[in-house]
Image (cartoon, rainbow, N blue to C red):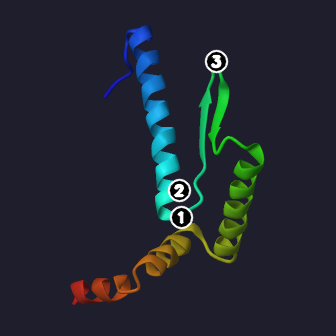
Amino acid sequence: MELMSNEQSRMRTYQKRKKGLMKMTYEFSTLCGVEVCVIIHEDRSAGVETWPKNPNEVKGIIDKHRSVESQDLRGKNPKTYLIFSLLKLDPSYLRKRENSST
């Protein structure tokens, strides 16, 4: 995959994909009942575009993420944090790993 050389084609593709990304973000948030935040930074024109559009909602989601992230990382190095994250997702991970090493 590489950067499209034709500027017009690149901008059309960018606009279509951005619109599709925002639509999928809305659907994901609505259907799954989760908070989602998308930030697109473009130097050429619009600068920053977000989903949700309301800056206060975006700030709230980012603040929640930072709060949870700082609580999870407290007292753990990055490797330990990753291991604990895997165990939260799949508690059987450790058992699988132990069984495969024997």
Name the amino acid type tagged 3: Ser
Secondary element at tag 3:
loop
Residue under numbered circle 3: 45
Q: As drawn, is 96 to the left or to the right of 73?
A: left
Mark 1 neighbour class, 10 Å CA radius: few under 14, some 14 to 19, many 20 or more: few
Q: Are marks 1 and 2 in contact (CB under 8 Å)?
A: yes
Mark 2 crowdedness (10 Å alpha carbons): few <14, some 14-19, many ≥20? some
Distance from the alpha carbon under mark 1 to that under mark 2: 5 Å
Horizontal and vertical percent position of residue 96:
28, 85
Residue drawn 52% across and 57% down?
30
Judging depth in this view, the residue of 92 and 55 nearest the camera is 55
Q: Which mark is residue 29?
A: 2
**Amino acid found under the numbered disc labelled 1:** Gly
Residue 33 image label: 1
Q: Which mark is residue 80?
A: none
Dot 1 lies on which element? loop
- Dividing the picture into quarters, in which one does residue 42 lie? top right
Look at label 2 and name its amino acid: Ser
* Quarter of the figure with the C terminus: bottom left
Occupied quadrant, residue 10 = top left
Residue 49 location, quadrant: top right
Q: Earlier in the sequence, mark 3 or mark 2?
A: 2
Report how far apart the C-alphas of labels 3 and 2 lie in the structure: 27 Å
Write the residue at 47% across / 59% down.
31
Q: Of 59 and 30, which appears nearest the observer? A: 30
* Spatial CA span between label 1 and label 3: 32 Å
- Residue 99, given in percent of the width and then of the height, sits at 24, 89
Horizontal side of residue 17 vs 68, given as left or right: left
28 w.r.t. 67: above or below: above
Mark 2 lies on a secondary structure that is: helix
Q: Nearer the viewer, mark 3 or mark 2?
A: 2
